[in-house]
Image: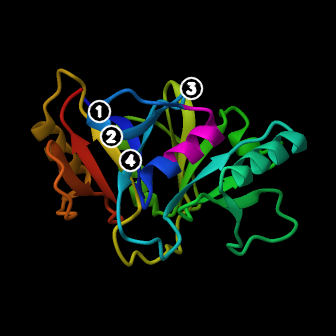
Amino acid sequence: MTSHLLALCFDANDPLRLARFWAGVLDWEFADDPHDGIALLPSDDTGFRIRFLPTREQKAVPNRMHFDLTSASLDDQQRTVATALALGGRHIDVGQRPEEGHVVLADPDGNEFCVTEPGNTFLADCGFIGALACDGSQEVGYFWSEALGWPLVWDQDQETAIRAPYGGPKITWGGPPLLPKPGRNRLHFDLAPPADGDRRAEVDRLVSLGATRIDIGRDETGRVAMADPDGNEFCVLTPR
């Protein structure tokens, strides 16, 4: 029995400020759960929450994952951009070409995200969060498909994508060349076995798929820190 993706976690210099930004952009509500700290609950079929964890480290390099937000029309795209800017976001240049239709922004902590153009066929049947786009190998796409029990919905030219059986965003990996990983990622996944599951058995299963146990230097009771085959950190929580 596989774990489910409970949360996408952001290391944040000001967790409350960053949570308010994303609550405003996504129209999500704050979670009423003291065990999860500052977290947002999805208002759609996203299927996972977003947690914000305090850190003193400043963002220095591009993240290995970012949101691709969808648009129904050019006016809709402009509204999303205007909302993000009003909440403290900003335009950034990551090498995008003028003819490309998506708009690249950063949240108040500098975390990159895109507002895609209307008519994006790859994300046509997805919600507002169309994808969590990741820098990663074909191997890591296969790993996460097995880890979460999500089928591959794209596997071509070393690019992969998975999606939950119930829908929600796609998680994509762009294949080589990969960005260097100089330190701990600012974004990571929290997984949890089902309520009747066994965390030790799940950790062993993930290791058999290619994950490793690590020490990320953060003492959070009830969490097993691990890394996927590309070295990206994630945590396995107690069953729930």
Q: Are marks 1 and 2 in contact (CB under 8 Å)?
A: yes
Give residue 7's quadrant in the image.
Answer: top left
Residue type, label 3: Ser
| Quarter of the image where the C terminus is located | top left
Q: Secondary structure at mark 3?
A: loop
Nearer mark to the viewer, of 4 and 2: 2
Q: Secondary structure at mark 2?
A: loop
Q: Sequence order check: which comes first, mark 1 or mark 4?
A: 1
**Residue 47 left/right relative to 236:** right
Q: Secondary structure at mark 4?
A: helix
Give residue 215's quadrant in the image.
Answer: bottom left
- CA distance separating discs 1 and 3: 20 Å
Magenta stretch holds residue 112: no
**Residue 133 left/right relative to 205:** right
Q: Sequence order check: which comes first, mark 1 or mark 3?
A: 1
- CA distance separating discs 4 and 3: 24 Å
Which residue matches tag 1? 34
Region in magenta: 19-28
Nearer mark to the viewer, of 4 and 3: 3
Residue type, label 4: Trp
Which residue matches tag 2? 37
Q: Sequence order check: which comes first, mark 4 or mark 2?
A: 2
Residue shown at the point (40%, 59%) measured from the top left: 139
Residue at the far left: name it. 200
Estimate the x, y position of residue 102 in percent, counting from the top left.
Answer: 77, 56
**Residue 71 left/right relative to 141:** right
Residue type, label 2: Gly
Which residue is at the front of the view, 133 or 52?
A: 52
Which residue matches tag 4? 144
